[in-house]
Structures are given as C-alpha cells and as structure tokens.
Image (tube, rainbow, N blue to C red):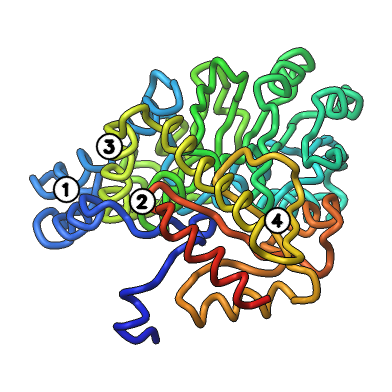
Amino acid sequence: MLLSSQRNRMIYFDNAATSFPKPPAVISAMCDYMTKTGGNPGRSAHMLSFAAGETVFAARQLLAELFGVSDPMRAVMLFNATDALNLAIQGILRPGDHAVTTSMEHNSTARPLFELQKAGRIEVSVASAGPDGKTAPEQIERLITDKTKLVVVNHVSNVFGTVQPIERIGRVCRKSGAAFLVDAAQSAGCININLERDNIDLLACAGHKGLLGPTGTGALVISDSFDYTKIRPLRFGGTGSLSDRVEQPDFLPDIFESGTLNAAGLAGLAEGLKFIAAYPGGAQAIGRRERELAAGFVESAAEAVRGFRTYTGSVETGTVAFNIDGISSAQLAGRLSEQGIMSRAGLHCAPLAHQTMNTFPAGNVRFSLGCFNTEEEIAIAVKALAAVV
C-alpha cells in the first residue's frame, strides 16, 4: 500500500493499462447511480429501472456519436475491449474460414485467433510489420484469399504507440469483402475515428483507457452498413426482452447483451465520453496533447540519460517504449516506482509486437501519457532516469 506521502507525489505514466485519474464527473456519476438510481436497466417497470435504462442509453448514444454511427443500438455494451474482440472474432469465424491479422497485435486478438486455429477450425495469416512497426495495406492484401472472412488490426500498439493506416487497410477489406475489425483499445478517445470514413465494420474499444471511464466497461461498435447477423452470440440468457421465449432475441443490442450490464460503470463511461466531447478540439486535441508530451520526453531523455533507446523513430501517440543500456526493464520500472513514477515493464501482453520490434524476450519500459500529465512531470521523470543511470 502506498503511504500518503507517496500518493501525494505520485506521477502516473501507465494510461495504456488504464487511465488515471478519472474526471471527477465520472466518479460522481457512479456514486449517483449506486446511491440514487440503483435499478436494473431494462428489467422492471418502475422509475429506477427506467432511469438506469436512460443511463445506459446515454453511453450508447455518446459512443455512436464519437465513432460516426447513426444507430445507438449498434453500440453493444460489453466488459472491455477483450470481450468485444472475442465476440467479433469467435462470432464471425466459422470452420474452414481464414483470418488475417498483423504482427503488432495484443494477445486479446492473437489468442482467440490462434486458439481457433489450434482447434483446427480456421487458418490464420499474419502480415509482418516493417521496422517502424507499420503494416502496409499491400501486405494484408497479398494474404487475403477467397476464404478470408475477417481482417483484424490493432489501430495503435499498446507497447510502441505505432499507428496503423486503418483507412487504407479498410479499403482493401471493402474490395475483398472481408469484414474489418479494428482493435481501438489504445486509440479510442485519443484519435478521431469514423467507422464510415475509415471503412471499419467493427470497432472494439475499452471504456477504461482513453475514454476515461471505469474498468469493467467496453463496447463493440458495429457500423451502420454491417450485417450484424453474421455475428453469432457467445452468451445466451436473460435480456429483459422477449421473456415469453426460450430463444435468444435476434435484434440489437439484446442479441449480444445477456445478463445485467455494468450500469454503474456505464454511468461513469458516459461522463468520460462527455469530457472528451467537451474538451476543446475533442479526441484529436487530446491525442495531440499526449503526443506533444511524449515527444518532449523522448527529446529530453535522449539528451540527459546515457544509454536511452527508443524503437519507432517518430512519436505518434502518447505511448513511448524505451530501454536503458545495461539495466533490465523490470529493474528500471521498479526504481522509478520507488520514486513515485508509475510505468510498465516487460512484454505488455504483446509478444508478437516485441518479436517484430526485436525487443523479445527482454521487453522494455513503457511510458503511456494521458491528458492530465504535465511538462513538469516529464522533467521529473527524465531527472529520475538520469539519476538511476
């Protein structure tokens, strides 16, 4: 447990794991739900249940608006990005199908895909990213066959912060007829994403990262043009609708939302989304702020810290992967933590990305900055790294 003196001087650089701190309105909305609303959304005919339903719908509507989807019911509420990726991957792919992904994926994509391949149900092809961590659309196009039903791409690497050209990859998918699933766990709330403009069929996002909501929230956002009946539900059960039947409802969002939703969490998520919408310049401006902080860190550390190394050349997001010669990433993160600087070390649940960038198996330290970080905190961190060396 952190002592109060440590908490007071804590610097948090682990926003790619979960954003912190949350906007005060997020916390207030969750408390209000737990103390004033409290009902189960869509399950009863009393005012508290109706109020809870309105809370959930507000989160749906804000997600749809953020990603350019006209029908809020196409924002399927789930528990995290991993849940959304599993629904899309396991729900779409059938025995004999083929899927294409990239060498920069998080295990939330890689594991369900390779589990299906291990079971002999599908075949998976991996498009290799270049030394800059980018995957050329031509690489993906060459791997697509007449059996390819799904292309899955990590928009922003959770380790290296590299941004994939999703609009161009989406064009390739449109041409081939393969469904295009984007893992936006690291980009939602930090990069302007529009499903129609970017040729995206399915977008998986986490509520607790760039969207500034609490853990236990996430969504699979389905484009207006995608036939959602191509996705087989993974969970079956109570939805509060068609209660006279034992069959699962076949309409959105109920077909994919069995069981009670995390309504308290979604109350908080709605406020996180409102914070992004009200931020001058929106998600794009938040991402620019984070990128400026990250670029400032890299420039200062390269000058002040002997043996400092990064891996991608340019800084595209608020996430920076680095090492210091002669010090393991675990050692370095531990020393930083002792000084109240929170980062992450190791392989970050992304072995494919580390293999691609030649940081496997040693891994690296990751600083992932958020919109609440400051230049002063960057200066303190650079000084701390120099002291460790």
Single out the residue that lies furthest toward the front.
Answer: 303
Q: Quadrant of residue 11?
A: bottom left
Question: Mark 4 sits on what residue?
Answer: 107
Tags 2 and 1 touching, CB below 8 Å: no
Q: Amino acid at mark 4?
A: Asn
**What is the spatial separation of the Cα atoms under label 3 and label 2, in whole angstroms?**
10 Å
Identify the element where label 4 is drawn.
Answer: helix
**What is the spatial separation of the Cα atoms under label 2 and label 4, in whole angstroms?**
22 Å
Instruction: Please determine whether, in this image, residue 340 is positioned above or below residue 22.
Output: below
Question: Mark 3 sits on what residue?
Answer: 274
Q: Amino acid at mark 3?
A: Lys
Question: Mark 1 sits on what residue?
Answer: 49
Where does residue 290 sit, x and y in percent of width and height? 48, 44
Q: Earlier in the sequence, mark 2 or mark 4?
A: 4
Identify the element where label 3 is drawn.
Answer: helix
Q: Quadrant of the N terminus?
A: bottom left
> Left or right: where does residue 173 sit relative to residue 87?
right
Q: Earlier in the sequence, mark 2 or mark 1?
A: 1
